[in-house]
Image (cartoon, rainbow, N blue to C red):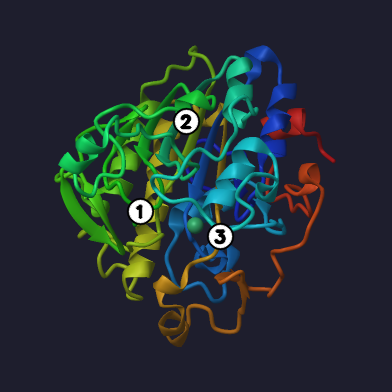
Amino acid sequence: MKTAGARHPFFIMRLPLTAALLLACFSASAADKPNIVYILADDLGYGDVQALNPKRGKIATPHLDRLAAQGMVFNDAHSGSSVCTPTRYGILTGRYAWRSSLVSGVLGGTSPPLIAPGRMTVAAMLKEQGYRTACIGKWHLGLEWAKWESPAERKQHPGWQFDFSKPFQQGPTARGFDSFFGISASLDMPPYAWIDNDRLTALPTAKKTWIREGPADPAFEAIDVLPGLTRKAVELISGRKQDDKPFFLYLPLASPHTPILPTAEWQGKSGLGDYGDFVMQTDACVGEVMAALDQSGLAANTVLIFTSDNGCSPAAEIEALEKQGRFRGTGILKIGGWWMVDDRGVSPCRRHDDGQAAFCRLWSVGKSRWWSEVVGEG
Ligand SMILES: [Ca+2]
């Protein structure tokens, strides 16, 4: 399917370790360095994108389908641990997560930093290459929150484990990003509050519960997060000029992870329940980013990557969705307590050397000028 607008070089689905792919950008000439937008969905099932599951996919994903049609699809990649935190660790450092202090599982919203100080990240490497770097979204790699100076101070703020009035250390801006806007971890992990660079935008004086109870900015609502992240990403792209420095936008979304909260505009759209509606809204976010790149004239020199950290969680009510035909006849594998859905039933967990994990088999759906020059026809 071809549509108006510039072609987006490629599309990737479920590719947890992509540092090597981003490294390919460095072989471009200094004057022709592409912008890079890396969108990471959270708990989006492989079979939920119609382009990847055309016969059985029931959720409309027109923007991802267009991206797939205009770009390239990588659909046989493997990961040692594919849930939220290890995926993010692998993407940003190029290392297996089990080489870090977190051998399995994920961090919480107030966990300490997982990426060691001084460790090279994709953002830091691109910054050295003259890129402006921004992270907008769900960090989930730990932050060094300020500790209370005295037990008396802590006593004055029951429920506050840390002094949230102070900036944290060792966050995204200490790991190679010029700027950060987003949330500390998963959307169901406190503190429930927006973060701007190295601090909360408002004190978490309330208590809220989205699965977990914790301190919350009274004005913060989980349902506003996907629209908020989308707006910020579009603002960043629209504010760029063609003669500016190249930019790297890392956009780790918090959807369609729990709490599954499509906005009123999307409720009921899929006919498959909240999860289907939230997937459609996530697809629309990708559409807004693509439109911003097109309208700002940046698309032709921007590498847009889309992937997901893992398959959809049991909270999506998989069995109910299956009864409606969503996964009919597809392979569903349970790895480490999480459902990995693949319409060919391929195991996503095989081990490779770090540098090879990102590239297994590759199918070319379309080649851009940039792809041909930088990566080559082979
Ligand atoms: Ca996830």
What residue is shown at x 65% (from left), y 52% (from top)?
A: 73
Above or below for 46 versus 287 = below
Q: Disc 1 marks which residue?
A: 189
Find disc 2 in the rendering and name its residue: 172
- Which residue does the numbered mark 3 point to in the structure image? 310
- Asked whether mark 2 lies closer than 8 Å to ligand 1, one says no
Q: CA distance from mark 3 to mark 1?
A: 18 Å
Would you identify the image quadrant in which residue 167 lies? top left
**Ligand 1 neighbours mark 3 (CB distance < 8 Å):** yes
Disc 1 residue type (three-letter)? Met
Amino acid at pointer 2 = Pro
* Horizontal and vertical percent position of residue 342: 63, 70
Task: State whether residue 241 appears in this view.
Answer: yes
Q: Residue at x 80, y 34 (%)?
A: 376
**Residue 132, relative to residue 101: is it above or below?**
above
Image coords of residue 191 (percent x, y): 30, 46
- Would residue 40 appear left or right of 274 to someone viewing this image? right
Instruction: Answer whether labels 1 and 2 touch (C-beta < 8 Å).
Output: no
Q: Quadrant of the C terminus?
A: top right
**Closer to viewer: mark 3 or mark 1:** 1
Gap in angstroms between the C-alphas marked 1 and 2: 18 Å
In terms of secondary structure, where does tag 3 sit?
Answer: loop
User: Residue 144 or 141: which is nearer the viewer?
Assistant: 144
Residue 129: image x %, image y %?
63, 16
Labels in figure, total: 3
Number of residues whose C-alpha sits closer than 10 Å to that of mark 2, classed few (under 14), some (14–19) or many (20 or more): many
Element at badge 1? loop
Which is nearer the N-term, disc 1 or disc 2? Answer: 2
In this rendering, position of residue 287 left or right of residue 16 = left
Q: Identify the residue shown where x is 56% and y is 72%.
A: 337
